[in-house]
Amino acid sequence: MKTIHRLRRTFLATALAAGALALPFAVSAQAPIVIKFSHVVAEQTPKGQGALKFKELAEKKLPGKVQVQVFPSSQLFGDAKELEALLLGDVQFIAPSLSKFDRYTKKIQVFDLPFLFDDIEAVDRFQSGPQGKALLEAMKGRGLLGLGYWHNGMKQLSTNKDKLVRPDDVKGLKFRIQASDVLEAQFRALGSNPQKMAFAEVYQALQTGVVDGQENTWSNIYSQKFHEVQKTIAETNHGVIDYMVVTNAKWWDGLPADVRKGLTEAMTEATAHANKLALDINEADRKKIADAGKAKIQKLSKDDVAAWRKSMEPVWKKFESDIGRDLIDGALKSNK
Ligand code: LMR
């Protein structure tokens, strides 16, 4: 026992003299800020690539000051939990699809209105304009700060049926939807049965027939292999899946100014990178799905598209007062 005490004393004395005991405090003062970035999609998707680019740029601009850890594919949190985790401080960055914020602001539902935007370029114009920029700050009172928009692409509709041309073809079918009241109303308007479900559960739900279909971008369909468990994908382009990169407003405000500046720059550059890739990734994945030959890609005539548009029209009226006519008009103006 005495020997142990003596050894401990000698160790303490030596350690103090060497300054080693001060080390843990010194390390924690200089330790990099760990930033966890959690998302639900695969790494090869536009969002997956954006998150990796952000990590690379942030660590380059702030060497030794930040360490960015990216968790793809719902590894850390699925989309049912990630917003909560961000507010609790368990992660620092997430990029949910715009459909998943309607609990925090009704205005953001504008992005879910069917057939509102003609294409992703129109979405981009709206997001970069004053109304889009204002939406990044619309949830600050709820603790969420938007740092940028990332594109994925336009949504296509898929089912486990051979025929998917007109709205009547989905009557009575069960569809997985994201947690969005607008999307729920959209499928009800079609006479289908929508079911809100986390992204990570969709493949299995399609495979086992819990649902008959879903709506998503080519990149999500391909990377999740939905085309292997669906018979037809109709090229409807009826809506958009885009993201808002959000952080915990309080955590962000508490960062040292130089770190906030570096992260803002990294985010701007990563956003440009991800948004440049999005269209190409979706086009390439559409081709891969066609080449795989598992699900048929159904092209639609102008007349077919008009029929889908008409069936979904009631959704606009239903949400107009929540969203605000000014936002809907602003979004419409972004179409050229
Ligand atoms: C979905 O849930 O279908 C998408 O929002 C997933 C994603 O993040 O792209």
Image: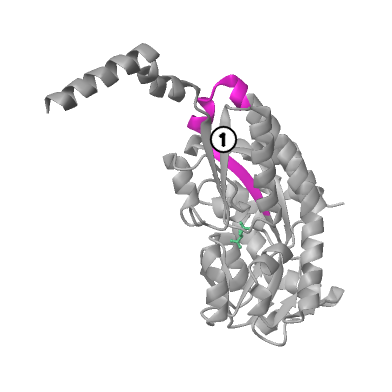
Residue at which label 1 appears: 67
Please provide the residue range marked out in magenta: 242-260
Local crowd at mark 1 within 10 Å, few (<14), some, or many (≥20)? some
**Quadrant in which residue 8 is drawn:** top left
| 251 magenta-colored | yes
**Quadrant in which residue 114 is drawn:** bottom right
Image height check: is 8 above or below 146?
above
Q: Is residue 334 left or right of residue 250?
A: right
**Tag 1: residue type?**
Gln
The spot of residue 316 in percent (x, y) is: 66, 60
Which residue reaches farthest left? 1
Q: Is mark 1 within 8 Å of ligand 1?
A: no
**Quadrant in which residue 20 is drawn:** top left
The spot of residue 94 in percent (x, y) is: 56, 46
Specify whether residue 139 is in view: no
Residue at figure coordinates x 57%, y 31% from the top left: 66
Which residue reaches farthest front? 3
Which residue reaches farthest top? 17
| 76 magenta-colored | no
Q: Is residue 41 left or right of residue 238?
A: left
Quarter of the figure with the N terminus: top left
The spot of residue 149 in percent (x, y) is: 68, 44
> Looking at this view, is 196 or 9 the one in front?
9
Specify whether residue 263 is in view: yes
The spot of residue 32 in percent (x, y) is: 53, 29
> Looking at this view, is 77 or 102 the one in front?
77
Secondary structure under the numbered disc 1 in the rendered image: strand
Ligand 1 image position (quadrant): bottom right
Q: Is residue 218 left or right of residue 189?
A: right
Residue at figure coordinates x 55%, y 21% from the top left: 256
